[in-house]
Image (cartoon, rainbow, N blue to C red):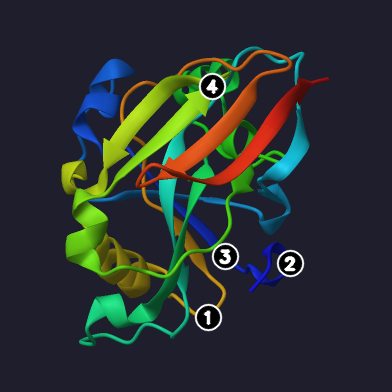
Amino acid sequence: MGTNDIRNIYCIGRNYKLHALELGNEVPEEPLVFTKPSHAVISMDGNTVELPGNVGEVHFELEIVLRVGQAYEQGMDAELCIDAMALGLDLTLRDVQSKLKAKGQPWLAAKGFRNSAPISNWLPYPGAAALAETEFVLLRNGEEAQRGKAADMIFNVSELIKYVGDHYGLGVGDIIYTGTPAGVAALHDGDQLQALWAGSPVGSCSVKLA
């Protein structure tokens, strides 16, 4: 399945305690779900990703992304829904988001802009145990910017699938951005980004702020 085959994009906010705290947010008691349009998706294949450069800071948030290969049904083994994983960036217009949050308005303008969901190559889903203990890393200009593993999630993979499936539905072609660890920061024009899974590069791109 390529990026053109992606249907719904569900994103989980504040799913790593330290990330929630670094932004001054409360740690949620149930998954915090928001969505991005499918037009937000762009491959991380060594390309240049053009982003808004005139509306404040654009923050990177590297996340494990799950791909749904079997429709969710209540009562099923939730992991059976997943047929692949990737690493993806939940890019965020942070200044815009802060203004929206202050007004109690939806996050779409801050989270759903074009190219706000760069995604790596798809990898075989390793199962919950291996996923939990495998580290993923974002390098910015060759230096480590973020490091995390799914074991640090507040809500694990099965809990996320059940929650999203029960509340909104999950079908083939849907993907889930599972939340980001601490370490997010603003991007700069020309930044080179590389996503690593278990120490191996799986996707990269450069940033153009226009």
Residue at image point 69% right, 38% down = 113
* Quadrant of image for the N terminus: bottom right
Q: Earlier in the sequence, mark 1 or mark 4?
A: 4
Helix, strand or loop under label 4: strand
Q: Nearer the viewer, mark 4 or mark 3?
A: 4
Distance Cα–Cα, label 4 vs label 2: 27 Å
Q: Nearer the viewer, mark 3 or mark 1?
A: 1
Indicate the amino acid at tag 3.
Asn
Q: Earlier in the sequence, mark 1 or mark 2?
A: 2
Indicate the amino acid at tag 2.
Asn
Give the class, few, some or many, for how many residues have Cα within 10 Å of label 3's Cα (few <14, many ≥20): some
Helix, strand or loop under label 2: helix
* In this picture, residue 92 sits left or right of residue 49: left
Where is residue 158, by image quadrant?
Answer: bottom left
Indicate the amino acid at tag 1.
Val
Give the class, few, some or many, for how many residues have Cα within 10 Å of label 4's Cα (few <14, many ≥20): some
Residue extending farthest to the right is 210
Give the class, few, some or many, for how many residues have Cα within 10 Å of label 1's Cα (few <14, many ≥20): some
Above or below 139: residue 70: below
Residue at image point 45% right, 37% down = 62
* Residue 105 horizontal/vertical position (percent): 52, 32
Q: Nearer the viewer, mark 3 or mark 2?
A: 2
Q: Earlier in the sequence, mark 4 or mark 2?
A: 2
Q: For this rendering, which residue is in front, 60 or 7? A: 60
* Residue 167 horizontal/vertical position (percent): 35, 68
Which residue is denoted by mark 4 in the rendering? 140
Q: For this rendering, which residue is in front, 181 or 12? A: 181
